[in-house]
Image (cartoon, rainbow, N blue to C red):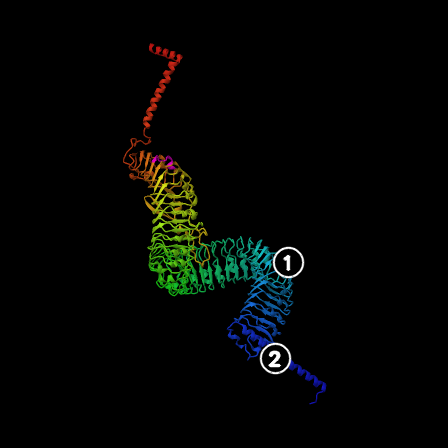
Amino acid sequence: MPTPEPDHAFAAGILLLAVLVVVGAGHAATESEADALLAWKASLDEPTPTTMSSWNKTAPVCSWLGVSCNAAGLVESLRLRGLDLGGTLNELNATALPALTTLDLNGNNFVGAIPASLSRLRSLAELDLGSNGFNGSIPPQLGGLSSLVGLRLYNNNLVGDIPHQLTMLPRIVHFDLGANFLTNPKDYLRFSPMPTVTFMSLYLNYLTGSFPEFILESSDVTYLDLSQNNVSGPIPYSLPEKLPNLKYLNLSVNAFSGQIPASLSKLGNLQDLRIVANNLTGGIPDFLGSMSQLRVLELGSNLLGGAIPSVLGQLQMLQRLDLKSNGLVSTIPPQLGNLGNLSFMDLSMNQLTGVMPPAFAGMHKMREFGMSSNKLTGQIPPSLFTSWPELIVFTAFGNSFTGKIPSELGKATKLDILYLFSNNLTGSIPVELGELVSLSQLDLSVNWLTGPIPSSLGKLTRLRRLALFFNLLTGTIPPEIGNMTALEVLDVNTNHLEGELPTTITSLRNLQYLALFDNNFSGPVPPDLGKGLSLTDASFANNSFSGELPQMLCDGLMLQSFTANHNNFSGQLPPCLKNCTVLVRVRLDQNQFTGDISEVFGVHPSLDFLDVSGNQLTGQLSHDWSQCTYLTILSINNNHLSGNIPAALCGLTSLQLLDLSNNHFIGELPSCWWKLKALVFMDVSSNIFWGKFPASTSLDEFPLQSLHLGNNSFSGDFPSVIETCCRKLITLDLGNNMFFGSIPTWIGASVPLLRVLSLPSNSFSGVVPSEISQLSNLQVLDMSNNNFTGFIPGTFRNLLSMMKQMSPWTVESSERHDVVQLSRISIFSRRTEPPNNRSPLNEYRDRVNIFWKGREQTFQKTIELMTGIDLSSNLLAGDIPEELTYLQGLRFLNLSRNHLSGNIPASIGSLELLEFLDLSWNELSGAIPPSISNLPYLGMLNLSNNHLTGTIPTGSQLQTLVDPSIYGNNLGLCGFPLSTHCLDERSQDHRRPGSDVGLCYSVILGVVFGFWLWFGALFFLEPWRVSFSHFLDKLCSK
């Protein structure tokens, strides 16, 4: 082997030395990178995932998870995507990673600010920090990463203005800052065009103002997403000219206005156009039908109006069409059936009319179809379901479809959601629906479906929600329902279902919502229902169930709404109720439940509504009720509860309705009850309360509209607190107590809205104050059985509400208008009740007790129709004021048992609505006015024990009042129905007494007048006298 020349040997030595230096430097650098990465790992949240166990000093750094190195052994890529890492980037030494080109931490739990030190990664080409929890602002220093090609900071909590420095990145291609809280400066003057960007996403931020100019200058963009911001103004007409390469354009959920620019037709490469939820107008332009490359067209939730262009049927490549909620007014063009690639179509929430085109069967790839909330009629084309084998969603609710549910639906075996509710569908539920084994949601509610629930539905083992309410279904619930083991919601309310519940219903181990109310179910509820379940809603109301409720119904302690009112349940209530701390609504009224109320209910901090009235519950109210601070309705009337009312009840500051009536409560009312600042309705009547009614220490206006204290032993003067705190009062019932003294004159001005004033059976005295006449809304005035003296005020003619039939009225909240209006519709239904539904408000109307047709009756649902005055059993004197006959809306008038005198007003017949009139036991005299026969509705009349005289008037309605006692003890009366006959009883003209005598006097007066007229003329007129003498002479000569 020849010896190398000296020069060649020297060169070889230099080369070897250089290699050794580079290798040594690389090794030293690798050690430095490893130390930096391990220091950062140590700062991360503990415990770090086991997948990071390879990060240790014993293994080469290039072998670590997510780490890759270049040929020189330097770390060039760090990819730790989706490893559930937490912590910050504060300890990441960017200077120690000079060769790093990719940093991908996407899909972890990193928090804190993005460090500005990342700008030292001079080789960085890809930075992906998306889907973490980074906060703070974006460091403007990142604009110095001159090698950066992809920047992904989306789905974090970043705030502040977008740094204009980012627009200066010279090589950036992918730019994604979406789903943050970023804003823009007042203008974009400092922003530069980004000519290298092809992907730009700023969606879901707080951008405002007009369309950003710097984006229009970024001419190479193919993907642009500005959705879910607040960008306004028109969509730029120049957009296709500026961004000619667009393939994807999403401007949805902004505030763009004006028309869809016709220039968009120039975007020949556009495949995806989304401009949902803006303020666009001007209709759907026809030019869209010529954009043959479109795969997605979403124009929903705008103000476009007009018709659906038939030319959209030319978009043969279209896969997704969204035109919902646009105010579209037209029929549906059958040409849309040509869209053979369409898999999604939503035309819901418009005003589309006509029929659903059978040509839609041509959409063979349809998967999700929405046609809800329009005005479509006719039948649902059966051919759709044999032509759409991939169908998974079909929603056509809220229309006026008629006819039967197509049995062909059973062919769409991949169907997951079927919503046909709120239509006019008739007939029975097809048994073929049992073939839809993939179905998870089935809603056929609010139709006119008849017949039984098919047992074939038991095959739907994946069904989670079954809603059949508001139909006309009959029969029983089939026992096969127990096979639907995935069922979470079962709602069959408001049908005609009957019989007992099948015991197999207890097999529904996932059941959460059960609504059976308003049917004809009977018998006991299966005793194991609820055992091991987490029921949140259970309603058995308005049926004929009997026996005990299942004692483990609330076993899961998740019950929120529980209603079993208006049944025949008896026995003890489920003891688990006491531990259901999430209860919100409970209605158990009108049953025969027994037991101690304090053992059934405990602390329910979320309870809003409780009605256990009309049962046989016993016990006392505990102090626990004070912790139900959200309670608005508390109705426990008509039970056997006793004891005092605890002062703790005053802590229910949200309470609007309190009904303790018809129990055995005793003692004085708590003086703190005025703390119930939201109270609108209060009824403590028919108990054993005594003492004075508590006064208020505050002069604040109180929302109270209805106050019932009747049938107790309250005493003292007329409650003065009403003057200062109860200006909104509509009903005041103080009857059957021991109040005394006079009625204050302030009553006319201080309670101007009063409609019912009931004060019977007390010891009030003095005159009836004329100021009552200022109550222009008053409909019922009952001051009977007291010690009032003086006259009946003639000013009663000013009681305007008694002059006409009043419109319906109910108690309402001063803060809201739904005191007791709680939706009967399933919370899963997300729709309103059908028209003419029965509102629960009807069950909590105000009420009043009135002595009506011989006995005391309670008027509640018809209270708005009741108008009348009862001043009976007092010491009133004088005439009956003629002005009372002006009150033509009166249905009852009772002035009996006073010292009234004079005549019955002649115009009594003007009270055309009067049904009950009692003037007995007074000192009335004269004839019964004939106009009384004009009262067509008079059903009860008592004029006995007066000094009336003459013939009793007759009339069609009076002839039905055959009891003679109603006129008894009036010695001057005669005629039907009395046995005393009048002298002219057999005459048919019913002349008044003395009419024949008058006729005789008239005849005599006529004769006398004629006689003196003739003979007076002979006496005073000489020519007449001479002529008469000549006549006699001639007569005699003959």
Q: Identify the magenta region.
A: 901-910
**Residue 927 location, quadrant:** top left
> Which one is in front, 200 or 269?
200
Question: Is residue 1036 found inside the magenta-colored segment of the image?
Answer: no
Q: In screen coordinates, is 472 left or right of 106?
A: left
- Amino acid identity at mark 1: Ser
Q: Position of residue 670 (x, y in %)?
A: 38, 53
- Tell me if I can see residue 96 in this picture: yes
| Residue drawn at (33%, 25%) of the image | 999
Residue at which label 2 appears: 27
Magenta segment includes 902:
yes
What residue did someone put label 1 on?
238
The Cα atoms of the two marked residues, 1 and 2, are separated by: 56 Å
Q: Could you tell me which quadrant the N terminus lies in? A: bottom right
Note whether 134 is above or below 744 in the view shown.
Answer: below
Residue 960: x %, y % from top left = 32, 40
Amino acid marked by disc 2: His
Instruction: Answer whether residue 426 is visible to the viewer in this image.
Output: no
> How many labels sit on residues?
2
Q: Mark 1 packing: few (<14 Cα in 10 Å), some, or many (20+)?
A: few
611 vs 464, nearest the viewer:
611
Q: Residue furthest bottom?
A: 1
